[in-house]
């Protein structure tokens, strides 16, 4: 899909992940794509040529708006959807789901936590049931007492204490935060190496979110989990993640260390995302003066066109820097410093100061 | 303070939910005023009673919700004099709702009728509340879409054919159909992406400037209110904890709960802050603890809090802005407690 000049694709994946310093490589997505057939002639490219790696003990955040394909990435990684193309590697080996046994192993190693703690637990089953099942499935033969002991340990780990007060409860007897803790415990029951958390806190109250994120962070550290944190909230990614991947229309448009990327966004879409987050320190901002460029009306109109793009950069209809080239050729994700990459033809205009700094590599 | 009389004055208002296990005191002695052209933010987590307060004030709740005390007075430009909303009969209520007080509900997907197209939904509202010919109503519907920047061609679209942001815009257009004095917005942007959220908020502010209505904006997202609202009321466990100008809430927060909320959300701009959050969970309102409901989660708590009488008191402040807090012990100048709260011990990111 890329139409770059001389051999630039070769350097495509040369960015050093900011997550790599934390631990060994756990899981890799190599040029994965997923198409959904919508009708006879229409194909939705939900995920296009996405590559990244997860490392033990590190958090990679996947940030994007709804419909950007970030949940599809999680489902692909969890083996819930088939890849259209590309490869997923676990511990360096391509994932093999051909036999029951290897599939089971894969499912133990890679666990998914969903956004909605209200619908991800079965209302007719107790907490005990939700946890005993994965313990039996993933931890081999155990006596009844051992299973009960393991359930207690799991509840302790997610700080549902005292555990025996929670084992007999049904989901409706728990608060949203407690339910999400049960979801975490259920994922841990498989003793995974990789945890894919799809918007794990966005349904929870603000005052609870932080506690849940710090719990997740604690579990990450304790079990050396490779964590993929999927969110639309780029501010939480700043605090929580080592590396941030920004996704737009099925592609990664920018990646880099969390702090650098959020403070000095390079891609125009990341810049828009950062500018749109509520910012109490900039009271008013352009909220109080909507007649600036990028006002509500203009944005609403360009948004309608954005869906129709099938050529060129998917962000070009909304991009203030777009030129003809952007509408014709899709830019590839190219590094502009040792740890950062962006898919944009107009970086020299969109983020000149970043480019000047990264030029040392001779890219 | 705004010298003119408030357009909506809620005073000592209480609402309970009657259950077999006893009353749930969802709203407890709440007083809040809304002035013309003002954006008042009502912040609180789920179950704090913020939606109950707004809906009960419009008499939108049925049994088992029960208004047990207080008054709600409406005094709009079109009204002859102050109206006691709690005494209105069915027909008068219908006159009040939508014409005078309109509501934008949280979930635009559920609030719109899936089998009616946009044109029919909007003209329905117009015919129910305004005397207007069919042609005029159609023209009005089209101009309402102009107002929220949706192309007129979308009049024939059904809700499922619209994006989440567009649906929410249609809801806002419908709320503005009868030129209301007050628009209550219940988490209007919670289900939306930040970029869309920002578009819609900017549009709301634009429309407010243009049409001059007052907004009661209900949300759990305090960071949003700091930017959007003129004044903020912080609600917890059915009671108001603090009411002040947005800038006061941000820079001079008094109540420990407000302080907790302010350290709960990660900031994207500026230096990284240490996030403390609020450990624990809200109390069970069927059996509210005596004294301050926030005590079990409060880092400043003492034994005196168990018997404290929860009343909003004025905080002395030089700017002369009205700043009320329900905590008699903690003032804006009070330093943070020495004892770290449970979740502060292991902050995010080693």
Image (spheres, coloured by chain):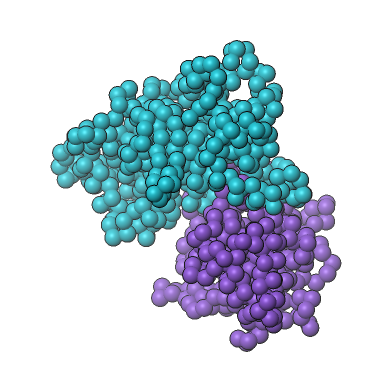
Along the viewing direction, whichever of A337 and B339 lies nearer the viewer: A337
Residue at image coords 72%, 71%: B179
Image quadrant in which you'd find residue A197: top left
Which chain did the image draw in cyan?
A
Residue at image coords 37%, 41%: A75
Residue at image coords 28%, 60%: A124
Along the viewing direction, whichever of B118 and A187 lies nearer the viewer: B118
Along the viewing direction, whichever of B339 and A356 lies nearer the viewer: A356
Q: Residue A148: x percent and y percent? A: 22, 46
Residue A78 showing in the rendered view: no
Q: Residue B54: x percent and y percent? A: 61, 69
Q: Is residue A144 left or right of residue A75?
A: left
Extreme residue in the front direction:
A41
Q: Is residue A273 above or below residue A38?
A: above
Which chain did the image draw in purple?
B
Q: Is residue B270 left or right of residue A9?
A: right
Residue at image coords 25%, 44%: A134
Q: Residue A190: x percent and y percent? A: 28, 38
């Amino acid at each position: 899909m890329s139409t770059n000049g001389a051999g630039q694709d070769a350097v495509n994946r040369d960015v050093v992940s900011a997550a790599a310093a934390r631990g060994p490589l756990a899981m890799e997505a190599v040029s994965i794509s997923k198409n959904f057939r919508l009708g006879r002639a229409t194909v939705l490219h939900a995920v296009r040529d996405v590559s990244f790696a997860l490392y033990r003990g590190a958090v990679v955040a996947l940030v994007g708006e709804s419909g950007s394909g970030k949940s599809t990435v999680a489902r692909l990684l969890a083996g819930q959807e088939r890849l259209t193309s590309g490869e997923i590697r676990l511990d360096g080996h391509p994932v093999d789901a051909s036999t029951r046994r290897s599939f089971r192993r894969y499912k133990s190693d890679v666990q998914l936590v969903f956004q909605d703690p209200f619908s991800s637990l079965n209302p007719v089953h107790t907490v005990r049931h939700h946890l005993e099942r994965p313990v039996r499935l993933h931890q081999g033969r155990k006596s009844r007492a051992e299973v009960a002991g393991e359930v207690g340990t799991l509840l302790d780990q997610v700080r549902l204490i005292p555990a025996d007060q929670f084992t007999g409860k049904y989901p409706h007897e728990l608060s949203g935060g407690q339910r999400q803790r049960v979801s975490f415990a259920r994922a841990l029951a498989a003793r995974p190496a990789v945890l894919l958390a799809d918007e794990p806190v966005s349904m929870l109250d603000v005052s609870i979110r932080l506690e849940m994120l710090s719990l997740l962070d604690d579990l990450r550290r304790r079990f050396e989990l490779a964590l993929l944190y999927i969110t639309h909230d780029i501010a939480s990614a700043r605090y929580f993640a080592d590396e941030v991947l920004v996704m737009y229309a099925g592609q990664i448009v920018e990646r880099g260390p969390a702090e650098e990327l959020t403070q000095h966004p390079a891609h125009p879409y990341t810049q828009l995302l950062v500018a749109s987050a509520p910012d109490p320190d900039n009271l008013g901002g352009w909220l109080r003066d909507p007649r600036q460029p990028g006002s509500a009306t203009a944005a609403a109109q360009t948004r309608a066109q954005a869906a129709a793009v099938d050529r060129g950069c998917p962000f070009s209809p909304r991009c203030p820097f777009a030129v003809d080239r952007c509408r014709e050729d899709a830019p590839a994700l190219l590094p502009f410093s040792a740890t950062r990459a962006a898919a944009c033809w107009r970086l020299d205009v969109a983020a000149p100061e970043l480019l000047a700094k990264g030029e040392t590599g001779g890219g | 303070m705004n010298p003119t009389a408030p357009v909506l004055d809620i005073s000592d208002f209480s609402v309970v939910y009657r259950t077999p296990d006893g009353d749930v005191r969802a709203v407890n002695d709440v007083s809040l005023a809304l002035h013309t052209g003002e954006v008042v933010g009502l912040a609180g987590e789920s179950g704090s009673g913020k939606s109950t307060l707004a809906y009960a004030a419009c008499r939108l709740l049925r049994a088992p919700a029960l208004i047990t005390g207080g008054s709600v007075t409406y005094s709009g430009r079109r009204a002859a004099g102050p109206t006691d909303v709690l005494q209105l009969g069915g027909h008068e209520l219908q006159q009040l709702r939508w014409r005078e007080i309109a509501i934008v509900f949280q979930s635009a997907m559920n609030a719109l009728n899936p089998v009616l197209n946009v044109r029919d939904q909007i003209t329905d509202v117009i015919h129910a509340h305004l005397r207007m010919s069919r042609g005029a109503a159609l023209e009005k519907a089209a101009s309402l879409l102009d107002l929220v920047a949706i192309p007129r061609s979308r009049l024939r679209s059904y809700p499922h054919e619209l994006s989440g942001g567009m649906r929410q815009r249609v809801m806002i257009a419908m709320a503005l159909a009868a030129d209301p004095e007050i628009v209550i917005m219940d988490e209007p942007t919670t289900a939306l992406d930040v970029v869309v959220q920002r578009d819609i908020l900017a549009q709301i502010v634009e429309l407010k400037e243009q049409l001059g209505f007052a907004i009661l904006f209900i949300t759990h997202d305090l960071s949003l209110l700091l930017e959007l609202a003129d004044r903020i009321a912080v609600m917890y466990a059915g009671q108001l904890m603090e009411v002040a100008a947005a800038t006061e809430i941000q820079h001079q927060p008094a109540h420990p709960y407000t302080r907790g909320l302010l350290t709960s959300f990660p900031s994207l701009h500026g230096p990284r802050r240490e996030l403390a959050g609020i450990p624990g969970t809200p109390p069970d309102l069927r059996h509210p603890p005596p004294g301050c409901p926030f005590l079990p989660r409060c880092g400043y708590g003492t034994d005196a809090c168990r018997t404290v009488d929860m009343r909003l008191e004025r905080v002395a402040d030089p700017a002369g802005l009205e700043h009320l807090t329900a905590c008699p012990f903690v003032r804006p100048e009070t330093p943070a407690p020495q004892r770290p709260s449970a979740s502060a011990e292991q902050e995010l990111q080693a």
